[in-house]
Image (spheres, helix red, strand yellow):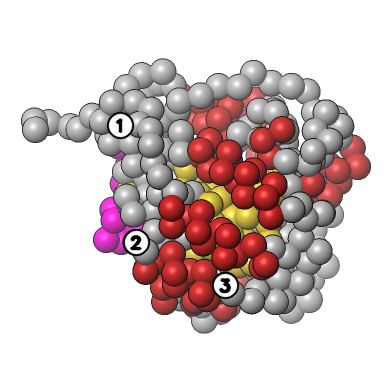
Amino acid sequence: MITRRRFLQLIGLSMATQMCLPATHPIDHATNAWVPSPEPTPLSMPEQPLTLVPPRIVSRVGVHVIPGPRTGFGTFVQQCAAAGRPVAVVKCVGDFGAAYDAKNASLLTLTIGRIETVSNINMRAWEPPGHNPPPGTNYTNAQEAAQQYYNLVKPIWKLNPKIDVWETFNEYSGDWGWQADFYISLMDLAEADGFRLGLWSASVGNPPDDTTYSDIARACQRARQHGQHILCLHEYGGIDPKNPSGLLKDAGPWLVTRYRMLYAYLSQQAAVIPLVISECGQNGGGQIVSQADFLADYTWYDDQLLRDGYVIGCAAWTLGADATNFQAYLPALTNYIINKVRYYQYLPFVTNGSG
């Protein structure tokens, strides 16, 4: 298993060719539900409008929240919503209060939650039997693992209805076939109780290459059928020696906007589902940058995400008890989101039928 932290030590990815323009899909603005549509090839004209999120959400920049101080967060989401520019994504780990603040400001904000531990059992990565399953578990296959996992998290999920989507594993970047089997079984269990999943949450630089894409596509094909599940990935600048600035915009497409390579494949497999970059930031998430660099970097990244209609948004690392807590930047980020201008349309607006 290769996590982002381990990746910081290894640093050794092969460069891959960047591929663009996979399929896009609309969303039901009233329910925040994704609506499937016919799958184009990566270079064909989409049959649906280039919109995946409500039109009032112009910026795709959201925030990541962990336990700890987040002074100004409530004001941030309220002011953005009051200006008609709701925050796209709020991701919460361990402390779900920020999701309540976000939903109270605007129902259009997508909220994502993740649980670190339950009953002292690590929920971040459940490896196959014979590898390194967490102490306290006794599964023999992926289906049993999904059932045991769900039994542990379901009571907590039920207590937090303001979370739209639940992530499970975090930066478990290995055992791709096992994870696909796990997620397919977990989707069946979650859907029966009305829960939505955020699949994979792979670390920066992952999935490592196209040999893993078929397993990811298999899970995404199942997610596309029903349940309104999404895909989650992580992207960071500053983990490549060629990127001394630490910024997203300098990282290169084999690390940042790497998701486009995967989505070109998913498009060919009728497996495109909505995407959230559920962690992203500078310096591998280990060191905060200046406010000017922070805003300039997310301005660049926002413009990249806007090019891909399947991207709901990103969760900027992080608010809370971490050295990279950017709470002091929230007023400036508020101003950016409120004044963001969508000044381009990458492909002509096409509708089905007449009119």
The residue nearer to you, when weighing 36 against 175, is 36
Across and down, in percent, residue 125 comes to 74, 56
Please tell me whether the stretch drawn in magenta is mainly helix, strand or loop: loop
The residue positioned 35% from the left and 58% from the top of the image is: 32
Residue located beneath label 3 in the image:
73
Residue located beneath label 2 in the image:
84
The residue positioned 70% from the left and 76% from the top of the image is: 69
Across and down, in percent, residue 334 comes to 51, 62
Label 2: which secondary element: loop
Type of the residue with mark 3: Phe
Q: CA distance from mark 2 to mark 3?
A: 17 Å
Q: Residues within 10 Å of mark 3 (few under 14, many from 20)?
A: many
Q: CA distance from mark 3 to mark 1?
A: 39 Å
The residue positioned 72% from the left and 76% from the top of the image is: 68
Please give left or right for residue 149 compared with residue 190 in the image: right
Residue 65 magenta-highlighted: no
Residue 30 magenta-highlighted: yes
The residue nearer to you, when weighing 24 against 214, is 24
Task: Using the image, determine if residue 226 lies above or below residue 244.
Answer: below
Q: Earlier in the sequence, mark 1 or mark 2?
A: 1
Type of the residue with mark 1: Pro
Q: Point out the residue furthest to the left here.
A: 354
Q: Earlier in the sequence, mark 3 or mark 1?
A: 1
